[in-house]
Amino acid sequence: MDLAKFRYFGRFRRYFANGLRPRSVSDNQLSFLLRKAIQDKSSDASIGDLLCQISDRLHHFRPKAVANVLLHLSRIDSNIPPNVQLRIALAERFRTCSLSDNNLSRTDLATTISALSSLDSPECHEILLSALNRVAEMAHRFDQRELSACVKALSKAGAYRDGWTDLMNRARQLVPELSVSYLISIAIAVSSSPNDEDVLRLLLQRLTARELRLEADSISAILCGIPAHKLPDKIMDKFVALISRVGSHANPPALPNLIRVLHSAGYTQDTRVMKLLIRRSDSIMDRLNAIDVAMILATAPNLTVYQARRFASRVKYHQESFTPAMLSVSIPPLLKILYHDDEGCSVLNSIAQYISRFVPSSSARELSLLANAFYSLQGPNTTELFISICNRALILCPIMNSQDVSMISRACQSALGEQCSPALLESLTTRAAQIADTLNEHHVSNVLWSVARATRPPREGDLSVVHDRAVAIAGTFTSEGIVNCLHAFSKISSLRNPASIAIFKKIALLRIADFRPGEITAMLSSLSACNELDQQFAGATIDPLMYLIPEMSSEERVVTVWAFISSGHDHLPLFSLIIASLESHIPQMEPKVLSNLVWAGAFGSIPDLVRLAPSMANRAVDLSSSSSCAQMTSIMLWSLAVLDSDDIPPETMRSLWQNMLNMISDLDMYPSDRLDFLLSQIWLSSLWTEIRFPNLLSSINQDQLPDLLLKSRESMTKVPCPLVSAKEQLFQQDVTSVVRKVVGDRNCLVEVQCPATGYLIDIVCDECSDGNKRIAIEVDGPTHFIGTRLTGASLLKTRLLENAGWKVVRVSYLDWRRPGQNPSLFIKTCIENGQSKK
């Protein structure tokens, strides 16, 4: 530093201390004093006094002083009173005097343009554009510093005309001479230009030259500053090679930036360069600050359990520095890896406990980010955290925006389940209805997902508004959003509008190729539950499902079969592929999955499932022995009766029945209608067991079994008949009238209960013309078929009635009223064929 200037600056500060002003100070000295005052972080009052001095003498300022003062002003707070007016005055001084001054140097021009681009003022921007002609005149003589300053300034201002072309020509000339720092700054500035790809390519080629030997910080600056689409694949490969060379020595903040950029460019966790960077981050974990940790976790989620534990500990170490936004990107990837790791979850739970103390003072935005971060974490601290979040959300609900409503509703419902406050979901739905016009497809999807799982649905009026918004923006929904909406429509009766469901089905069919396997199966399940899975929609999903079977989980495969069978749709090739793929998964199946599989296979009369009956029965024995699975056991017993397999060992059946008796008390937990249904299944399976294993039931605990069978027999009269369409009812009436004509009114009885089995028989021919008796006529409408096959329930009914001494005649709607067919003759033939020969 010049000694005279240093001494003068000390004298100037003494003048300030005494409230005096220097008598004779040049423009360059004032500029220097301003720079020193800013560097020394002087008070706003001192800087303001100095700015007043500059303002008073502005008309004497030469180009160099104007340039320097403008540059210094761009680095201080614009709220200091004289600053705003002085900026405009200096910029005007530059336009009126400096631009026309033949003594204006290249350095002063570059400095002024750089300063003007940093000053957020329309007047300054306009003056900058007026200087482009002067830039064009001098560009061919710019050195690398001047070139860099002007290119960055014009790029920031978006001034890609006049002088810009001359700057690009000069850049082409100087590329071999530019230092690394100027190469980087110019390349980043040029990358924002809509043209000039050739200049950018020259700069990048120079940057990747072997002799430059870039370090990690420089590579990070380049890749973060230049848009990915402006980096050709060959250049990107060279940068990756450079990262592989220097990555083991990278330090923050370059290290997390490199991980983020490579992740965005499609480099997965399994690639060599990403493994190198993750190992480096692990080795310097104690040097990573909160921002570094958050950035790495947001872009490198596929860590090992050990690495995830280390990062979780680092998050805990910096927990005071983590903002809600940083937690929202850091915690979910850790939870994904540490979900079953006790040590890792313990660390995350302690973080949740620490964070919970700030919930009562959180804003709506902070609350939604915290909820989004921790909703997948299990533990007492998480429950306590979300109860606090619910209480705070109830207070903030009236001022929440659409994103807050969306995130909090889904997170709280996911974390608390049945413990989630119905009052909160009702308030959030009311708020969503109030701001319905601002809800996008993601917000609507999350709100509907939450209310579909609530213990008590919100008010119909609010739900109706959200429903109408969903229909209005139906075309914008993603595949996940469509699935969530259809699930809500199927679960909440007030939303079950066939027209709305049809709209979403139509959109889903157009985008079916974009759906993931789990989304297709969830959609099939929802549509089946509300009886909206028609043949066209089911058929459109078959080809994608056949292709996606290897990617499905065992539960998704079972749900697919269950949805098709529940809706009466048949596709044996699809079922065969799914069942073959499930054979090895049966020993690990959960109760619900096993129940759905065996029921679907039995009710749908799927032949391939018969050979799996022994392994499914063994799995049911294991499950019912270790946990309370009364519903699964009763479904399994009924399904085995339907499948009628010859390969089920007696010991397996004995164990199933014994386990069923051990769970009698658990049956009381079910609603009466569900209980009657389960008991009826137990009764029918007992009849089949007596046929297949004559002495088995008598060898089981006789203290409980008779009471269970008595209750089960009584339930046969309580189970309501399946709902059938008006068309099917007319078909049954039509058949009944024809039977009456054939056998006479006195010999035709309708809906007679079989004493031995408890079944309700559609039509009984009490006495036929040839003296035969006990003819049971079953009228089989569409609900008795899966495709063209009788359902398993109908087949079991036939077997049990025949075993009880009935001759069963089945009249199918597929054979009824064929062209040229005489109904009376058809019925007479059916009855004769159904009777035994004498």
Image (cartoon, rainbow, N blue to C red):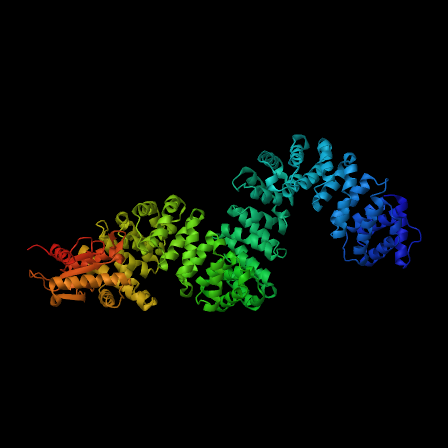
Residue 139 at what x, y percent from top left?
77, 36
Total tally of numbered discs in the picture:
0
Residue 360 at what x, y percent from top left?
59, 66
In this rendered view, identify the residue nearer to me: 97 or 578. Answer: 97
Outermost residue toward the right?
Answer: 23
Q: In terms of image quadrants, where is residue 653? A: bottom left
Q: Quadrant of the N terminus?
A: top right
Report the side of 732 relative to 543 (left or right): left
User: What residue appears at the point 70 percent right and 40 percent down from the top-left corner?
Assistant: 185
Q: Is residue 674 above or below residue 180?
A: below
Report the side of 61 relative to 288 (left or right): right
User: What residue appears at the point 7 percent right and 61 percent down from the top-left corner?
Assistant: 769
User: What residue appears at the point 43 percent right and 66 percent down from the top-left corner?
Assistant: 455
Q: In terms of image quadrants, where is residue 783? A: bottom left
Report the side of 574 relative to 313 (left or right): left
In this rendered view, identify the residue nearer to me: 672 or 10. Answer: 672
Residue 318 at what x, y percent from top left?
62, 54
Q: Is residue 222 above or below residue 374?
A: above
Q: Is residue 637 visible?
A: no
Q: Is residue 408 visible?
A: yes
Report the side of 837 relative to 590 (left or right): left
Residue 345 at what x, y percent from top left?
51, 55
Q: Quadrant of the C terminus?
A: bottom left
Outermost residue toward the front?
Answer: 820
Q: Is residue 315 above or below residue 134?
A: below
